[in-house]
Image: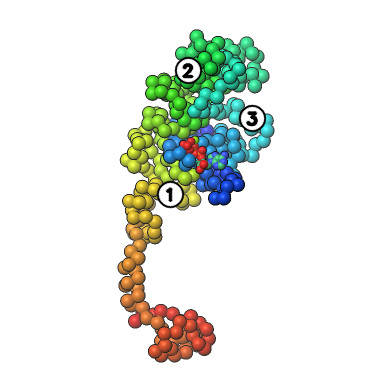
Amino acid sequence: MSDGRAEILKADGLYHVYDSKAEDGNVVALRGLHVSVYEGEAVAVVGPSGSGKSTLLKCLGGLMKPSAGGVELAGSRMTRLTGTELVNLRQNTVSFIFQDANLLPHMNALDNVAQPLLHQYVLPGVARAKAQALLDRLGMGERSRGMPEELSGGEQQRVAIARALITNPKLILADEPTGALDPITSREVLEIFDTLHREEDVSFFLVTHNREVAAFCERSLELRDGRFVAQHGTDVNIADLSGSRELIIDDTGTVTLPPDVLTKIGGPGRFELPGIERDSLNLERVDVERLQVEGKANLILAENCPACFHVYGDSEEQRCPDCGSSRPMVQA
Ligand SMILES: Nc1ncnc2c1ncn2[C@@H]1O[C@H](COP(=O)(O)OP(=O)(O)OP(=O)(O)O)[C@@H](O)[C@H]1O
Ligand SMILES: [Mg+2]
């Protein structure tokens, strides 16, 4: 859905390797990912545990430096920025929401929400007024003096959302934002996202195991072992991803098959491409049996050496005894 909109988030050839002292060596968590999120778009990342979702989110949000590849946030190459430049870009563009609210335990809800503005040297009175307005909006107005430990999981998450919104981010990165919530509270959180998305054009890039959260997004990217294997539309069913898959061929020409598709076509191997056309590609497994049997049936060892014309006669030799050339196979 680019329709001329700018990319709020873009990553090229993103790799991440975790160093490990364990015997089985380093973990390659991301293997050359390309990501584009357009302004106002909501994109989900779905995939099994350990597929690299959190690693991807941390690299995209500048919380972790990828081992290779670049990330652009609102047109600025984040991987080139350092120190205050990076902090400023992040503060003005992107906010994080994690699975656990991660509130500062010694501050009440209001001060937790106001905190990011205080970091930007906004006057405390102004910051607190804005924090209160956001908490009101999220149905938490009367709990604003509550300490985190006095709030339920859903209330804490709403405070975390208010804290994420106070800087007016253009993009929200969220790692399983409803993962720790009951179904009713997660629906409430989703409604808040939906309003922000529709009314304020906020972009979302979120990791989820929740079907409704994925359905809220315009598209979902399926991550497996650090590679995107498919994209899904709003009809995605997280419990059965096979029904809505579109394979992705990236601009390096790389395509990765989902494991169940690989099993269905009979496992790895070599494939012919009969009838390549624009917008269409058929794969047909190279019939190893056929090639070997037919090929071998018609080929015999050459009678003469092609280099020095040595005559092999009845010999089965594979190499010419006179000049050392290897003995070719020829059509019978
Ligand atoms: N700090 C770390 N050191 C070493 N390996 C790590 C580290 N963090 C993650 N990994 C490994 O990197 C891979 C991707 O991990 P990641 O946390 O990104 O997965 P995930 O998709 O978010 O999983 P989950 O759904 O369980 O949250 C896994 O194999 C994981 O074991
Ligand atoms: Mg994770």
Whole-angstrom CA distance, mark 3 to mark 2, is: 31 Å
Left or right side of 104 for 174? left
Judging by the rendered image, the residue that carries numbered circle 2 is 152
Of label 3 and label 2, which has the lower sequence position? 3
Label 2 environment density (alpha carbons within 10 Å; few <14, some 14–19, many ≥20): few
Residue 143 location (% of width, % of height) = 51, 11
Choose between 25 and 226: the one closer to the eye: 25
Q: Residue at x 50, y 87 (%)?
A: 321
Ligand 1 within 8 Å of the CB at mark 2: no
For this orientation, the residue located farthest to the top is: 142
Residue 67 location (% of width, % of height) = 59, 44
**Type of amino acid under label 2:** Ser
Judging by the rendered image, the residue that carries numbered circle 3 is 87
**In this view, 34 is above or below 215:** below
Left or right side of 328 for 266? left
Q: Foreground mark, 2 or 1?
A: 2
Q: Foreground mark, 3 or 2?
A: 2
**Type of amino acid under label 1:** Thr
Left or right side of 166 for 43? left
Label 1 residue SS = loop
Of label 3 and label 1, which has the lower sequence position? 3
Label 3 residue SS = helix
Of label 2 and label 1, which has the lower sequence position? 2
Whole-angstrom CA distance, mark 3 to mark 1, is: 35 Å
Q: Which mark is residue 256?
A: 1
